[in-house]
Amino acid sequence: MSDLIVQDVVKRFGRVTALDGMSFDVREGEFYCLLGPSSAGKTTMLRAISGLERLDGGTISVGGRDMAAMPIQGRGIAMIFQTFALYPHLTVRQNFSYPLERAGVASSETSKRVGETAELLRVSHTLDRLPSTLSGGEQQRVAIGRALIRRPKLLLLDEPLTNLDAKLRHDTRAEFKRLHRELGMTMLYATPDQLEALTMGQRVGVMQSGRVVQVNTPRSLYAAPMNTYVAGMVGSPAINLVKGRVTRRNGGYFVELPFGALPADHWGMHLSGGEQVLYGVRPHDVLLGHEPSRGPGFDAVVHLTEPLGDVTLLDLEVGGAAMKMALPEERAASIGPGTEIQVTLSAADAHLFHAETGVRIA
């Protein structure tokens, strides 16, 4: 059952269309991520759901109720913003209790919820302190608590980890997953960071120019992106895309790339001779050495190595085409700039896209 249904939503700011026929649904109790770059419309979408923006078209329903005429306070929705947005002159206890006092909740119930929320988020020791005395991680947990204490049906999270350092982002991602598991709450999380979306989302909606272009599980988006845009948004390092041309000879199809021909019978029923395509292979599927059982081998020159901890990223030139390759650190330790190596492109893991439209050839 869907808890949130967004259908054909349009929102304009003057001549700028921020949401252009946006449609998606979030199931009850689901952790759903909206993934898209800046200006894709993520924040506008969340503000529209919460009632902070009026729609120019389309509908939004939560729990089966149309939100068009619902006041902001009556929607059963809470939102956490990029900034912590805490009241600086109030203690943590007062920040927690303020929304309940506004809602007319009895003081005994307010005290109970404040204690439960502080314990859940492990900030009980900060209750009598001002926000300015807290660490960034503590401030973020207080912002989360102030949203959760109202016990919303739907929690909206707008890039909530943007202002945290790398360690705190990692810790807070785990915290959100723990809270989702323990509370069973429906959560909609907007982010430009694919790591956040793919590690946290049960399903991910990839946004482009004000609409969702593909929805699926993180694994399925990685394995079967519908176009080059999604392929580039999902997966790190980014997918290699090499221009090629389809040829047919000896009854079979091939993709002619700058460094050689690759068999393409796997896509044969969808191809035509002379067609311009993009051959996509992820850096983790560029293999070191010649492995005939996995695919054809090619000579390459290493231009740059980028150690990333347990993985090293190699920038290669393969027959005039630039490609990236990811290797375990111990295998890359002896490889430096200028080294000549042989690589194999894993044929079973490759993708083929129409060059003109960018659409994936199934």
Image: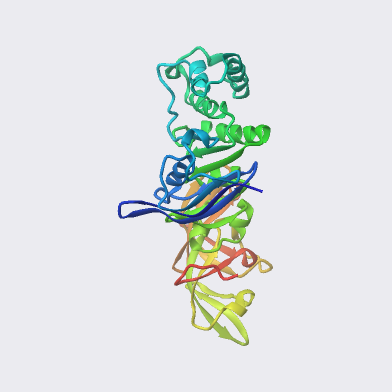
User: Looking at the image, which residue is at 60% across and 46% down?
Assistant: 64
Residue reaching furthest to the left: 14
User: Looking at the image, which residue is at 55% across and 67% down?
Assistant: 360
Residue 174 drawn at (x, y percent): 60, 34
Residue 101 drawn at (x, y percent): 51, 19
Q: Is residue 183 visible?
A: yes
Task: Choose between 304 and 22: the one closer to the eye.
Answer: 22
User: Looking at the image, which residue is at 58% across and 15% down?
Assistant: 111
Image: 271 above or below 225? below
Image: 361 above or below 83? below
- Answer left or right for 17 relative to 357: left
Task: Choose between 151 and 168: the one closer to the eye.
Answer: 151
Q: State how the image is colored.
A: rainbow
Residue 265 drawn at (x, y percent): 63, 77
Image: 271 above or below 299? below
- Answer left or right for 10 relative to 239: left
Quadrant in the rendering for residue 121 = top right
How many numbered discs, if any?
0
Q: Quadrant of the C terminus?
A: bottom right
Residue reaching furthest to the bottom: 250
Residue 138 drawn at (x, y percent): 51, 23
Q: Is residue 235 visible?
A: no
Task: Choose between 165 and 34: the one closer to the eye.
Answer: 34
User: Looking at the image, which residue is at 69% across and 68% down?
Assistant: 293
Task: Choose between 34 and 75: the one closer to the eye.
Answer: 75
